[in-house]
Image (cartoon, rainbow, N blue to C red):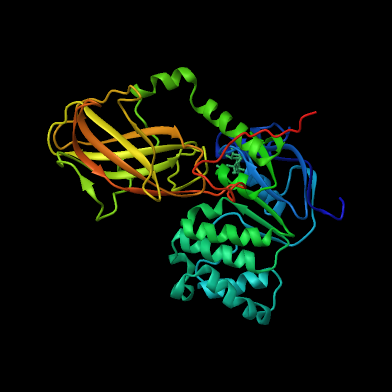
Amino acid sequence: MSDQTAISLNRITKVYKLYDKPVDRLKEAINPFGRKYHKEFYAVNDVSFSIAKNETVGIIGKNGSGKSTLLKMITGVLTPTSGSLKVDGSISALLELGAGFNPEYTGIENIYLNGTIRGFSKEKMDEKLDDILSFADIGDFVHQPVKIYSSGMFVRLAFAVAINVDPEILIIDEALSVGDIRFQQKCFRKIEEFKQNKTVLFVSHDMATITNYCDRAIWINEGAMIEDGSPRELAKQYQAYMMGSKITKSEALQAQAVPDTSISQDEVDDLPANLDVLGDNKARITGITMLDGITNEKSALFFPGQAVKLIIKLVSHENIENPLVGFSIKDRLGNIIAECNNVVIDADIDDVKSHQTVSYSFAFQLPQLNKGTYTISPAVASGTLEDHVQHSWVHDAFVFQVMSTRRDALQGLLVLDNVEFNQLQ
Ligand SMILES: Nc1ncnc2c1ncn2[C@@H]1O[C@H](COP(=O)(O)OP(=O)(O)OP(=O)(O)O)[C@@H](O)[C@H]1O
């Protein structure tokens, strides 16, 4: 391993023994002829890579592909079944919420506990305390036992500790996704500062995070490494793979007839109060939510061109015939960027009975929007495109952010994607 290498994995494998019944474990232990009662499961299979000291690397892969297992082996929480692994530098890791914290201790006590685990004296931690508290920004909750914290508060404290104990290598397993958007942004600003001369390794399902913050990405699938390369390229390949593995073209054509089960109607967020609403109120829009189109997780932070799903929920006060449901996307100045409704995409909707609550989803790719704040205004009407009665049209019901890309220094509403640049002979 060279001086410049922070992490080096050589043919790392982690095998779990899976038993059909708990008693099989006992049978295997006492069987005099060494008969096996287990099946072997390769959670990580023959993975090799090195990470340099100033690199920020993102690990991507679908659920259960072995990402966390890999990180846990790097941090020493798990031991590989075979292969060798070297780490040069002190690690600070956010793997699972709660790891390294005593639930009965207060926030402050846990800060000192973590300091002790990492070999810092009380005096050294006294010096760091203000930075940790101001970063975590959870007010008087620091004096309460952490078992009463919300997951958001918890991640605030855990990240504040992890980043302020002078690690050389920062490892984060999707932990930030439980924080709110402002806190996530604050963490990424801090990571940006940190990564200048250190090593960052993180798992994320969010391709914007991977493309914006990583120098390199590693794609793990079913325990094996599929690719190691440019974050942009891998994010594209991964998204195409995830789309392909979830929905084939012929299934897409039938999609109108198949109920959407990505989330339940109850999980759609209520509209904020005091919004401007136009229409006769025979049907009222009551909820709106956006999801990451791949993971189906709620989000209000996307990257240009990301696959998303918009869900609009409404309740009718009368029978609504020939319903027309749609939305417009506007920029922060109110310019309409795009509009869509079920009729223009040839999706028929059954008439809605009086006092019925229904939700509809639109799955689409966001335009290549430049970074900024955008809003969505949903509407429900009845009739045709040319001649309809507006029941409810809610201005700016949902606010979302488009993340910056490396081209965010440039002006314009849209970013140009896939630009090839060459010099003529
Ligand atoms: N202790 C264990 N015993 C048996 N199988 C396990 C154990 N821990 C993890 N696994 C399995 O190993 C595989 C990899 O799990 P891992 O948590 O590393 O995946 P992941 O890529 O991090 O998934 P996610 O994106 O859902 O967090 C999964 O199929 C999981 O069920």
Total number of numbered discs in the rendering = 0
Residue located at (61% from left, 46% from top): 407
**Residue depicted at x 49% and y 43%:** 413
Q: Residue furthest bottom?
A: 123
In the depicted structure, whether residue 191 falls above or below residue 24? below
Residue 264 shows up from this direction: no
Q: Residue most toward the right?
A: 2
Residue 338 to residue 182: above or below: above
Between 282 and 114, the one nearer to me in the picture: 282
* Quadrant position of ligand 1: top right
Picture quadrant of residue 253: top left
Q: Residue at the spot x=51%, y=38% of the render?
A: 368
**Left or right of 396, for residue 53:** right
Above or below, 182 relative to 44? below
Q: Quadrant of the C terminus?
A: top right
Residue 216 pos. (x, y %):
70, 44
User: Does residue 229 appear left or right of residue 289 in this picture?
Assistant: right
**Residue 204, position in %: x, y?**
58, 46
Left or right: 162 as drawn, with respect to 346: right
Q: Using the image as rendered, state which of residue 16 and residue 424 is in the foreground.
A: 424
Query: Along the horizontal axis of the image, is 248 left or right of 408?
Result: left
Q: Mark yes or no: residue 97 visible.
A: yes
Along the viewing direction, whichever of 235 and 96 lies nearer the viewer: 235
Q: Residue 345 location, x and y as percent?
A: 35, 24
Which residue in the rendered view is the most extreme toward the top?
250
Instruction: List x then y, in percent, for residue 389.
Output: 17, 33
